[in-house]
């Protein structure tokens, strides 16, 4: 067993609990069982109750480095295995980092206009932990893709490395196309928000007060007024949040991002998109 | 003469082995609060009145005695620059100091917040000792202190309590001069570089600068402030007529400005590569997977810190053109 057994949110004696779980039918090997203690011990129930969650990579595939040397900025990507159609689409992806103080790092919402429910973003990871993306389809079914991640890196504090620079730039928003937009095709775009995303978990040793949390909590991206991607985000998202998502430009039009943080500060950005008519020709 | 090139070999202590042993014993006998001197702790004299406890490259919390710790002996008292990764390491340094002088320690200067440089502070926290840090050090310590204590016990096997977090009493913006008797130390606060709160110390008597982690030798540089700021700081310092530096990591002394070259070359190459990655729309994951360094064989701990540096540089450089937007 190489898992970190030091922290156990629910105070269950781990070895005993593990033993009991191992006696239950249909559970994985002992290592996975131990890793999943926080999830099985309450997190899953709190968010999904008794709903069936199918664990497989058939609907979405979660990718992350196995070992993250910079725990403050760990790249995560989720790749959908089905297209977004009006008949069936991925409606929501919940992303959990079991051992983080706020395990639900983000709830991401998609529409048929998203084209693909693919997503790339960056998170903070506090410890060796399972991470999991759970997709809810428009017919109400839940599918989970799970990984285990080793985040180390000693001094890479979740706090920003240059806080003054981050504060000076707070609220700046960039929207950009990462490749040429194609008419009526799923097209990737990137939303970047300059924000220190202070977690509020850091105690000031002098005053023994917690620094107030200040982070991006909501964002919405629309194309020509129709929502293509939105999210509620927590402190697990890295400083300067960055999201790569897809949308389907059916015409020339305006991509709009609206962002709200926990102090109710609002930031926005727009981008004129002129998709190429020549379908199937990918530039770059 | 010491050279920064090639592998560092531990220098013989300047004090004779026999007197070292004797002093160690007398230290244990007369200062019980110091405990006994660790026989593994040696300090080497690099100039008259200047001693360095050499560090050995390792990942923070995965080893002890990582950073170079310095001692400057004045006519009146002693200044200590950085204190190590635990009170035990700080006590061993304190004991080694007793082996070379009986003058009291009056200043502890922390070059920055990282645990291998300042978690030994507690060993020096007593009346008559003033702790000196960058004006932004208290904030960094407040934001990270608890995390460091947690990680020290989770990864390093040390159970460190809150007494290990010692805040500076005197904070520095610009420069401050400290008089330790016959020697004036100029303490200088830098703009964001290795961290956002780096201090360096110049001893004009020996024309030696203690630059903390603004200079890495052997141990791969670690970016935790600003890659742009760090390059600027090193270029500025390179133009100054300093004879020698004591780097935060690497040999206990190296000639200046030659010693700046490896860190500068690494940072400049990394900046060029990450800039071309971000400007062509590449993402973080692919940058971390693909951006290599040309001088891989020249550095230790590449596998532990390079990918991390790519991430830190990426995060900074993808926003460096923000003022030109809109």
Image (spheres, rainbow, N blue to C red):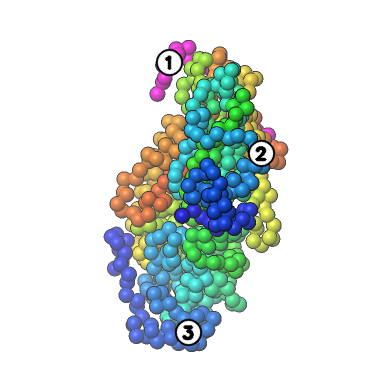
Asked whether the residues under marks 3 and 1 belong to the same chain, the reply is: no
Q: Residue furthest top?
A: A277
Q: CA distance from mark 3 to mark 1?
A: 79 Å
Kindly identify which residue carries mark 2.
A49
Which circle's residue, 2 or 1, is located before the other in the chain? 2
Q: CA distance from mark 2 to mark 1?
A: 44 Å
Q: Is residue A73 left or right of residue A13?
A: left
- Of discs 2 and 3, which sits in the foreground? 2
The magenta stretch spans which residues?
A266-284
Secondary structure beneath dot 1 equals loop
The answer for which chain carries disc 2 is A
- Please say if B216 is above or below A172: below
Residue A244 appears in the figure? no
| Position in image of residue B194 (x %, y %) | 47, 53
The answer for which chain carries disc 1 is A
The answer for which chain carries disc 3 is B
- Please say if A33 is above or below B133: above
Kindly identify which residue carries mark 1.
A280
Secondary structure beneath dot 2 equals loop
Please give the name of the residue rendered at 39% of the width and 40% of the height, measured from the top-left corner: B289
Figure quadrant of the C terminus of chain B: top right
Kindly identify which residue carries mark 3.
B28
Figure quadrant of the N terminus of chain B: bottom left
Residue B220 drawn in magenta? no
């Amino acid at each position: 067993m190489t898992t970190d057994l030091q922290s156990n949110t629910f105070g269950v004696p781990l070895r005993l609990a593990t033993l009991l779980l191992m006696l239950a039918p249909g559970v994985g090997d002992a290592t996975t069982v131990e890793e999943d203690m926080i999830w099985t011990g309450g997190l899953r129930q709190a968010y999904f109750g008794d709903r069936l969650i199918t664990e497989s990579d058939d609907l979405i595939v979660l990718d992350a480095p196995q070992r993250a040397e910079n725990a403050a900025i760990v790249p995560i990507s989720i790749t959908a295995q089905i297209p977004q159609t009006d008949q069936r689409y991925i409606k929501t992806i919940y992303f959990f980092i079991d051992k983080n103080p706020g395990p639900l790092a983000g709830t991401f919402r998609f529409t048929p206009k998203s084209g693909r429910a693919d997503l790339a973003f960056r998170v903070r990871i506090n410890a060796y932990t399972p991470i999991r993306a759970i997709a809810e389809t428009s017919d109400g079914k839940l599918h989970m893709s799970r990984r285990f991640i080793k985040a180390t890196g000693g001094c890479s504090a979740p706090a920003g490395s240059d806080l003054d620079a981050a504060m000076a730039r707070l609220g700046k928003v960039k929207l950009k196309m990462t490749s040429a937009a194609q008419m009526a095709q799923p097209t990737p775009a990137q939303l970047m928000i300059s924000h220190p995303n202070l977690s509020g978990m850091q105690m000031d040793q002098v005053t023994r007060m917690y620094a107030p949390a200040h982070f991006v909590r909501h964002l919405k991206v629309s194309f020509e007024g129709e929502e293509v991607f939105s999210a509620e985000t927590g402190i697990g998202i890295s400083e300067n949040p960055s999201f790569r998502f897809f949308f389907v430009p059916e015409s020339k039009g305006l991509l709009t991002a609206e962002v709200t943080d926990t102090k109710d500060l609002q930031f926005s950005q727009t981008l004129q998109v002129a998709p190429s008519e020549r379908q199937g020709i990918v530039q770059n | 003469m010491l050279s920064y090139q090639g592998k560092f070999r531990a220098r013989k202590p300047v004090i004779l082995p026999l007197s070292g042993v004797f002093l160690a014993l007398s230290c244990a006998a007369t200062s019980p609060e110091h405990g006994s001197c660790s026989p593994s702790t040696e300090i080497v004299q690099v100039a008259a009145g200047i001693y360095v406890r050499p560090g050995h490259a390792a990942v923070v919390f995965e080893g002890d005695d990582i950073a170079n710790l310095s001692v400057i002996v004045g006519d009146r008292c002693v200044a200590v620059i950085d204190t190590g990764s635990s009170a035990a390491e700080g006590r061993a340094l304190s004991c080694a100091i007793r082996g070379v002088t009986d003058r009291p320690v009056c200043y502890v200067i922390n070059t920055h917040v990282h645990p291998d440089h300042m978690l030994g502070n507690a060993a020096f926290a007593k009346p008559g000792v003033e702790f000196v840090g960058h004006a932004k050090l208290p904030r960094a310590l407040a934001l990270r202190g608890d995390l460091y204590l947690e990680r020290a016990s989770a990864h390093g096997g040390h159970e460190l309590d809150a007494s290990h977090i010692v805040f500076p009493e005197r904070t520095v913006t610009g420069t401050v001069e400290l008089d330790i008797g016959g020697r004036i130390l100029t303490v200088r606060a830098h703009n964001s570089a290795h961290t956002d709160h780096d201090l360096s110390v110049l001893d004009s008597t020996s024309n030696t600068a203690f630059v903390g982690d603004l200079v890495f030798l052997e141990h791969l540089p670690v970016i935790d402030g600003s890659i742009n700021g760090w390059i600027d700081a090193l270029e500025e310092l390179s133009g100054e007529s300093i004879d020698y530096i004591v780097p935060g990591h690497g040999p206990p002394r190296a000639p200046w400005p030659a010693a700046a070259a490896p860190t500068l070359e690494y940072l400049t190459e990394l900046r060029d590569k990450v800039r071309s990655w971000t400007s062509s729309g590449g993402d973080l994951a692919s940058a971390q997977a693909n951006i290599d360094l040309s001088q891989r064989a020249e550095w230790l701990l590449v596998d532990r810190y390079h990918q991390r540096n790519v991430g830190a540089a990426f995060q900074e450089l993808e926003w460096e053109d923000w003022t030109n937007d809109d």
